[in-house]
């Protein structure tokens, strides 16, 4: 919304924010009696559903880290893969996120698919992939995306999940949350109220 000078004088951002609708998407059916044992399976189902329903760039997430002073930082990036070790993303070691991960190797990912009123949160320690994996990741990028990256600067990291939460919103505020945690043998999960 673009306001003219007269409207800008009377416009109150806080009033405007309070008046915005929330949770305007349409949540897909979710059968909690058929939850898979592995959260990666559920994530793949949700990702495929999001893509099929036209959610733009459903593999995009917000990555949160902390700096040397313990101050949180966040940015948007692309999920590269999920494998038995963890959830992979990549960037340069010389970046701010690289410096933060070197200082505090832990992070969180947040996916938000507004049209489906769904979010997925992943958190845990971060491990650096092998030099060969990082080099292969860089080699898979376009030549233009490889330009100006110094040798050895490109890194593939993985969040090793200690908690994965699937959240589906509801207009009546009775949101559904399913939280998976590793249990030594695999995963256990619980269906929780909103938090």
Image (cartoon, helix red, strand yellow):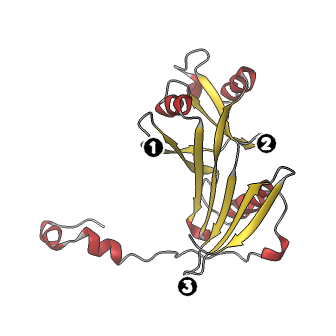
The residue that mark 2 highlights is 83
Residue 172, numbered label: 3
The residue under label 1 is 73
Q: Of label 2 and label 3, which has the lower sequence position?
A: 2
Q: Quadrant of residue 4?
A: bottom left
| Residue that appears at 41% across and 36% down | 69
Residue 62 percent location from the top left of the image: 54, 49
Q: Secondary structure at mark 2?
A: loop
Q: Quadrant of residue 42?
A: bottom right
Q: 191 or 53: which is nearer to us?
A: 191
Residue 53 on image: x %, y %? 67, 66
Q: Secondary structure at mark 1?
A: strand
Say few, some or many: other residues with alpha carbon within 10 Å of mark 1 (under 14 / 14 to 19 / 20 or more): some
Q: For mark 3, does the 10 Å Cα neighbourhood hold few (<14), some (14 to 19), or many (20 or more) residues?
A: few
Numbered badge on residue 93: none
Question: Residue 121: which quarter of the image?
Answer: bottom right
């Amino acid at each position: 919304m673009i306001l003219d000078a007269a409207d800008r004088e009377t416009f109150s951002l806080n009033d405007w924010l309070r008046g915005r609708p929330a949770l305007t998407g349409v949540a897909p059916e979710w059968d909690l009696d058929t939850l898979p044992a592995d959260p990666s399976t559920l994530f793949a189902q949700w990702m495929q559903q999001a893509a099929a329903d036209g959610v733009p760039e459903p593999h995009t997430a917000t990555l949160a880290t902390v700096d040397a002073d313990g101050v949180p930082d966040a940015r948007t990036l692309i999920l590269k893969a999920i494998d038995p070790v963890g959830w992979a993303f990549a960037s340069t070691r010389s970046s701010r996120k690289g410096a933060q991960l070197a200082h505090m190797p832990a992070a969180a990912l947040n996916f938000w698919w507004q049209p489906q009123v769904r979010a997925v949160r992943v958190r845990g320690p971060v491990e650096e992939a092998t030099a060969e994996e990082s080099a292969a990741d860089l080699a898979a990028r376009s030549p233009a995306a490889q330009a100006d990256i110094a040798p050895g600067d490109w890194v593939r990291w993985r969040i090793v999940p200690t908690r994965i939460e699937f959240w589906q919103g509801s207009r009546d505020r009775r949101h559904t949350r399913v939280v998976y945690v590793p249990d030594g043998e695999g995963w256990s999960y619980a269906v929780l109220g909103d938090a």
